[in-house]
Amino acid sequence: MVRLLLLATGLLLCVSHGLCQQPDPEIETVFEGKFAAWKTWVNEHTNSSTHTSCKEFEDIVALGPKFLPLLIKKIQKDKSNFSLTTAIRLIAQVRIPEEKWPEGRMGDSISAVNVYQIWWHEDRKNIEQTYHALKSRWDELKASPDIERTEMGSPLLWYDQTAYNARSGSLLVYGRRHITDLGHVYISVEGLGIDILPLIIIDLTNKRYDFLSIFMKMTQFHVDRAKNIGDQVDDILAWWNIHKEEWMMPE
């Protein structure tokens, strides 16, 4: 376990100082081929709603995190590539908070070009501080006697609503209709994207499991629920040490 902690810590330092993800001379060639195929689709289909739903776009998303610098360069060079901000969001699994957007323009495709450049070049520099600040707020709220809890005493993050559709006789479920203060912190942590995976790994190594579900959601890792939590975490740490390079975000 100590060895795993050292590996995780070294990985975090690697991310902080940009030592991971050495450039692969073939990466740009692969990317340009996928990009050219997507641009051909875009030029042949004027409806922008199809630009992020075609196979060519899915092929770009499938390239993964190490191709993110090239995506950033494409939107920086030409704003007509604004649809690539969706690829950036999907790969990084990041949610840019409302305060980072121009007023009244959250989610706007054109605004996203500048928003994602700022996120990449500036906001990510503070990812560790942001994560720890949110974790401190999480601890503060979780310990408060005033937060909303279930009858069993578990902290509540949000409520869902279930409505009855009289026309079809079916039930309609609306997720996260009421989000608690603790829930807002959880969503903010999750919104930091895969940049925080090495930080969660360090927490797991230290037997802190608060954001284990975020790790599993981002990586699609499935634990064996028949095992105790310690064995589940050991499985995750072993998996991470094999697959971590697939998830690392270049500086």
Image (cartoon, helix red, strand yellow):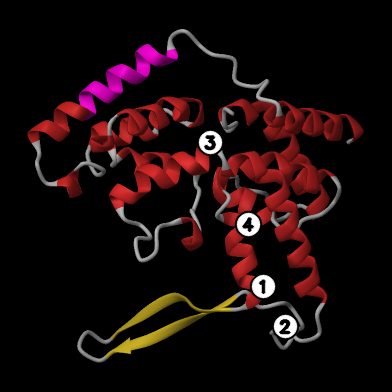
The amino acid at mark 2 is Ile
Query: CB under 8 Å between callouts 1 and 3?
Result: no
Please give the name of the residue rendered at 29% of the width and 41% of the height, measured from the top-left corner.
Answer: 82
> Residue 247: image x %, image y %?
58, 33
Q: Earlier in the sequence, mark 4 or mark 2?
A: 2
Q: Is residue 231 magenta?
A: no
The amino acid at mark 4 is Val
CA–CA distance in space, label 2 to label 3: 36 Å
CA–CA distance in space, label 3 to label 4: 19 Å
Horizontally, residue 62 falls left or right of residue 6, namely left
Q: Which residue is mark 4?
A: 189
50, 76: nearer the viewer? 76
> Residue 65: image x %, image y %?
50, 31
Q: Which residue is mark 2?
A: 147
Q: Earlier in the sequence, mark 2 or mark 3?
A: 3
The amino acid at mark 1 is Leu
Viewport quadrant of the C terminus = top right
Seen as rendered, the residue at the extreme front is: 103
Query: CB under 8 Å between callouts 2 and 1?
Result: yes
Please give the name of the residue rendered at 74% of the width and 66% of the height, measured from the top-left corner.
Answer: 138
**Secondary element at tag 1:** helix
Q: Is residue 35 magenta?
A: yes
> Closer to the observer: label 2 or label 3?
3
Q: Which mark is residue 121?
A: 3
Horizontally, residue 107 falls left or right of residue 225, namely left
Q: Earlier in the sequence, mark 3 or mark 4?
A: 3
**Can you see residue 100?**
yes
Figure quadrant of residue 186:
bottom right
